[in-house]
Image (spheres, rainbow, N blue to C red):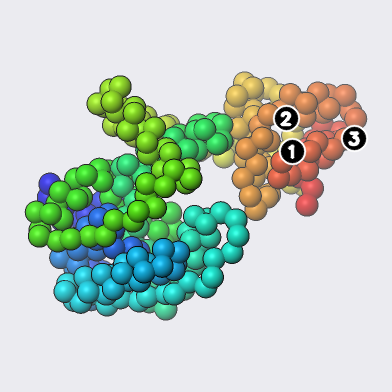
Amino acid sequence: MDMDKVTREALARVGVEVGKVPAIVLFSGGGDSSALLLSMARLRGSADLVALHVNYGLRGCSSDADEDFCRDFCALIDVPIKVVSAPEAPGGNLQDWARNLRYAAAEELADSMGAGAVIAVAHTADDQAETILYRLFASPGRRALQGMAERRGRIVRPLLGVRRAELREWLSDQGEEWREDESNEDTSFARVRARKLLADAESLHPAAIANLLQTAEDLRAEGAELAAVVDGLTDGLTTEDGDLDLDGLAELPPALGGAVLRRYVEDRRPVPVPKAARVLEEALRLGRSGEARELQVEGARIAIQRGRARVLH
């Protein structure tokens, strides 16, 4: 595998010209982030490139050994490193806490490096497949099957098309080592269980993950086209007062009408409201009846009156 070519082309796809904008690499010391950091350092040198390592302190001496490895690795490839020591972990979902902590630290560092700074994350094709599988089980709808985007704001993911094993093979060919986190085998974490399910899937068919990823790519492309249609319809059915015209909504096919209702609601709420589409039939019925009622969906309240819908805050 020509890792440098993979990284350069992936960054170009998301509008990042190598060496032209400051970059932060989230660096755990694992095989994925070690490969990404090494490749980016080879492509651009150390100018405006920083590795960010968070020591969560969750694994005692192993966490400290990870930090030491990261410092040594960065010294060898001449890349500056910023290490953040996490506060004591609260109760609840440890993975969510750790994710929020590292992204907050990355955003703060990016702010200090300039508006154009990007945050490079070493999510791989395997991570993408695990994410899709988990979301499919946890949340219904086509959005769950679209997976992670190659770019979201400052965050870029250049390795989404590369398998985890390929990265480790490439690192070995370069004579480089990496750290393995034993928690990657801890089945108390949902992602680890998803990983094992995917291993079983590949034993059933060797192209299982490739097919899953291709399906996600197709759905992302179709989703972009559908989103443009839904945006146009939502704008056309929104009155000058900001209400949604239910008579016009009733003329659409139900699947499209539900998508428009969801978009209208989500445009006015700070969180996703996936269940808004499911109240389409009830909203239309109330609109036809002339009743003034409220519909409650998880994440929003919708007032129905005189053939119109309005999101209540």
Splitting the image into 4 quarters, where does residue 276 fall? top right
- Neighbourhood count class around disc 3 (C-alpha, 10 Å): few under 14, some 14–19, many 20 upward: some
Q: Which amino acid, mark 3?
A: Ala
SS at badge 3? loop
**Mark sitting on residue 93:** none
Asked if one can make out residue 134 in the rendered structure from this viewpoint, the answer is: yes
Residue displayed at 72% across by 30% down: 279
Residue at position x 30%, y 22% in the image: 204
> Does 277 sit left or right of 105 as displayed?
right
Read off the residue under disc 3: 292
Q: What residue type is labelled 1?
A: Val
Q: Which of marks 3 and 2 is nearer the N terminus?
A: 2
Q: Residue at x 39, y 32 (%)?
A: 197
- Disc 1 target residue: 297
Above-or-below relation of 233 to 12:
above
Q: Which mark's residue is nearer the viewer, 1 or 2?
A: 1
Tell me the element at label 2.
helix
First reached walking from the N terminus: tag 1 or tag 3: 3
Q: Identify residue for label 2.
A: 279
- Residue drawn at x 37%, y 46% is 185
In the image, residue 158 sits, relative to residue 286, either above or below, namely below
**Horizontal and vertical percent position of residue 264:** 66, 41
Residue 275 image offset from top left, x and y in percent: 66, 35
Question: Which dot, 3 or 2, sits closer to the camera?
Answer: 2
Q: Given the current orientation, which residue lies at the most extreme front position?
A: 61
How far across and how far down the image is residue 61, in percent?
Answer: 36, 69
Among the two numbered marks 1 and 2 on one chain, the one whose residue lies closer to the N terminus: 2
